[in-house]
Image (spheres, rainbow, N blue to C red):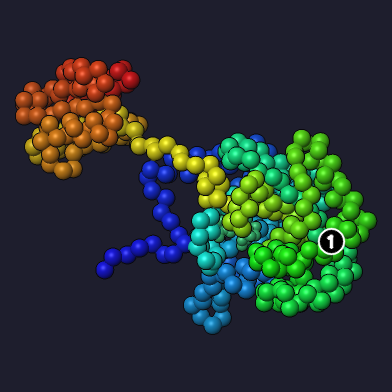
Amino acid sequence: MKFSLPKGTRDILPSKIGQWKEVCEKASALAARYGFSEIITPEFEDTALFERGVGKGTDIVTKEMYTFSRSPKESYTLKPEGTAPVIRAYIQNGMGSLPQPVKLFYITSCYRAENPQKGRQRQFHQFGAEVIGAASPAADCEVISLADTFLKMMDVGEYELNINSVGCPECRREYYALLLSFLEERKDRLCEDCVSRMDLNPMRVFDCKNETCQAALAGAPLMIDHLCEKCAEHFEGVKEALDASGIRYVVNPKIVRGLDYYTNTAFEFIPVGEGTAQSTLCAGGRYDGLCELLGGESTPGVGFGLGLERLLLSVGEGEAESPCCDLFVAPLGKEALYKALSIKQQLINAGFSVQTDMMSRSLKAQMKYADKIGAAKVLMIGEDEMAKGVGTLRDMKTKEQFPVPLDDIAALAGAIKAEE
Ligand code: ATP
Ligand code: MG
């Protein structure tokens, strides 16, 4: 029987690993420059954390979670997103008593049982960042700025930052009444999902990917026109902070995000000219109610999640990287092989990258192989060399050869270094 990887997952093969690591390292280094500390949370959490923290009416909770249990008393879910676990960790570890705000970033796998397509996987990765404990628009600007700088640094091409405000529970109450009566009149033109959204979180109809629903929403009342004074002021503050930071944005009143816990700011970074549902590179927003909802003290927060696979689709192919090899030791015969293994081990311990034959190849075939893997030098140990205790060191670039004592590791190390 032949096995294939599960639908919606992928291998990161050696030819792609260099690019993958570079993206992760750049994200970490940039987040650190902004003063964010890294956090790693488990791959799975109590199912209830996501039901509460993401919201029972969301696509994630209703359709996309990988949930498992090994006894009737427990139910766990592979993390579909990174914010709820980070807030759980913030509360559980008493991070509320640290100097505020607490700025955390993560690079994590996320798991969602979705229909796999280009840019949409069942296991994918997010670079995410959260500012917890700051209510000011400067905090919204901080996370947006981090995501924006990262996307620019990665050369993703043209994109647009869309921002909106989804208000607070106060201003939403009045607005929902207006929106619901609008939706009620057009109920027959809405998809099943949207009809059920009407009961749970009506604003989320704007997030529907169905074109008929989008058409039915033309002329719908918009949250942004019904913000309470405090929310309107916050939204103005965010725009001013972005202006002051030189970050370009457009206000898009239909950005509502798929998660239930957002308050005030919601934003998305969308590539220009693609228009597909799979193209949003990064999305986030403010979630002032989340901490309390998860059993902590009322604490404001704002953050984003940026899909690394989608980012790489926009960046294109990176260059394949092969591991370096300072020295390939090419022995002939069993005795020489043991000598080679001893030399290899000592040079590895001394910090060099060294390989030797594992295929019982002829000297000629070993030279060919050493050339293919890009070894800088080859130490040949044939019968003669073993007898004399002196190997032949070949520089693969200049093709020069010279004798080196086999029992003097310091001299060997010097010879490898000297020619570099
Ligand atoms: P979409 O509307 O595309 O389903 P979403 O609202 O579910 O996105 P978020 O939960 O906000 O997305 O996740 C943030 C980012 O994570 C997205 O902008 C995207 O880059 C990435 N992402 C989300 N789901 C997937 C997936 N299934 N495969 C790959 N990347 C994803
Ligand atoms: Mg989704």
Compared with 334, 386 (above or below) is above
Q: Is residue 283 left or right of residue 415?
A: right
Judge the density around disc 1: few (<14), some (14-19), many (≥20) Cα neighbours within 10 Å: many
Location of residue 336 by image quarter? top left
Q: How many marks?
A: 1
Q: Is residue 43 left or right of residue 147?
A: left
Q: Secondary structure at mark 1?
A: helix
* Residue at 77% across, 53% down: 252
Compared with 189, 53 (above or below) is above
Q: Amino acid at mark 1?
A: Met
Image location of residue 403, percent across then percent down: 16, 18
User: Residue under circle 1?
Assistant: 223
Picture quarter with the C terminus: top left
Q: Is residue 139 left or right of residue 308?
A: right
Quadrant hosting ligand 2:
bottom right
Asked if disc 1 is less than 8 Å from ligand 1, the answer is no
Compared with 288, 17 (above or below) is above
Location of residue 299 by image quarter? bottom right
- Residue 335 seen in the figure: no
Image location of residue 204, percent across then percent down: 73, 66
Comparing 305 with 300, the one in front is: 305
Image location of residue 51, percent across then percent down: 66, 71
Compared with 396, 192 (above or below) is below
Image location of residue 58, percent across then percent down: 67, 69
Q: Residue furthest right?
A: 229
* Residue at 47% across, 62% down: 8
* Residue at 87% across, 70% down: 178
